[in-house]
Amino acid sequence: MSAKTSRSIIGWPVYLVLVFVLIFSVLAAIEFFNYTPTDTEHVPEATLTADSYLDKVTPLLADASAERGAELVVQYGCTACHREGAVNGIAPSFTGIGERVGTRRPPLAPEAYIYESINFPLAYVVEGFTPAMPLDFSSRIPAAEQGDIIAFLLSPDAH
């Protein structure tokens, strides 16, 4: 076999892979720039009440485990911004969150505020911080695990 023939045989798979990478990159870029979070169950600020979101949160907390929630905030990378990043002003610290959340967004109950923050992070951004919370946690974190995270954040062990 000549050198030219062997190069052309080896070259086609490389070109084919490059074409697939290019196509995938273009499709990923299109999806990225066209992404809009679905916010169909978000309660507008003008209609917030003390009962907002509680129909969803109360069942989540029924069997929630704060211990499991402590593991989940690490698993989902929450600690990157709410622990390490808190010192750099990326996100509020988890330390003392149980006391703060009751006054953060009246009239929401503390557990409802945390639920809203996970599922609708653009609904309220704490003053002094930029909206850095991932917009897809509502679809990435199963409901039961959200309950565990909320239970942990409301516990005195949250830090």
Image (spheres, rainbow, N blue to C red):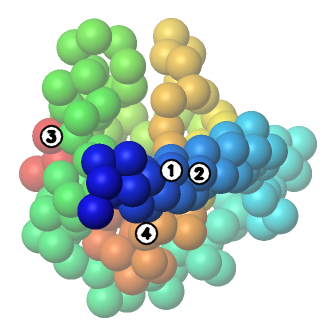
Which mark's residue is nearer the viewer, 4 or 2? 2
Q: Which residue is rendered at x = 38% and y = 34% of the image?
A: 100
Q: Where is residue 77 in the image (x, y as percent from the top left)?
A: 27, 47
Q: Position of residue 144 (x, y in %)?
A: 39, 82
Give, as a three-letter code, the residue at label 1. Tyr
As drawn, which residue projects farthest toward the front? 2
Residue at the disc numbered 1: 15
The number of numbered discs placed on residues in the rendered structure image is 4
Residue at the disc numbered 3: 159
> Does label 1 or label 4 sit earlier along the sequence?
1
Which mark's residue is nearer the viewer, 1 or 2? 1
Which label belongs to residue 19?
2
- Secondary structure category for the residue under label 3: loop
Q: Where is residue 65 in the image (x, y as percent from the top left)?
A: 21, 77
Q: Which residue is rendered at x = 65% and y = 52% of the image?
A: 23
Cα distance between the residues tagged 4 and 2: 34 Å
Cα distance between the residues tagged 1 and 4: 39 Å
Give, as a three-letter code, the residue at label 3. His
Q: Which residue is rendered at x = 38% and y = 47% of the image?
A: 4
Left or right of residue 47: residue 88:
left
Q: Position of residue 11 (x, y in %)?
A: 42, 51
Cα distance between the residues tagged 3 and 1: 51 Å
Q: Dots 3 and 2: beta carbons under 8 Å?
A: no
Which label belongs to residue 126?
none
Q: Dots 1 and 2: beta carbons under 8 Å?
A: yes
> Does label 3 or label 2 sit earlier along the sequence?
2
- Secondary structure category for the residue under label 4: loop
Which mark's residue is nearer the viewer, 1 or 4? 1
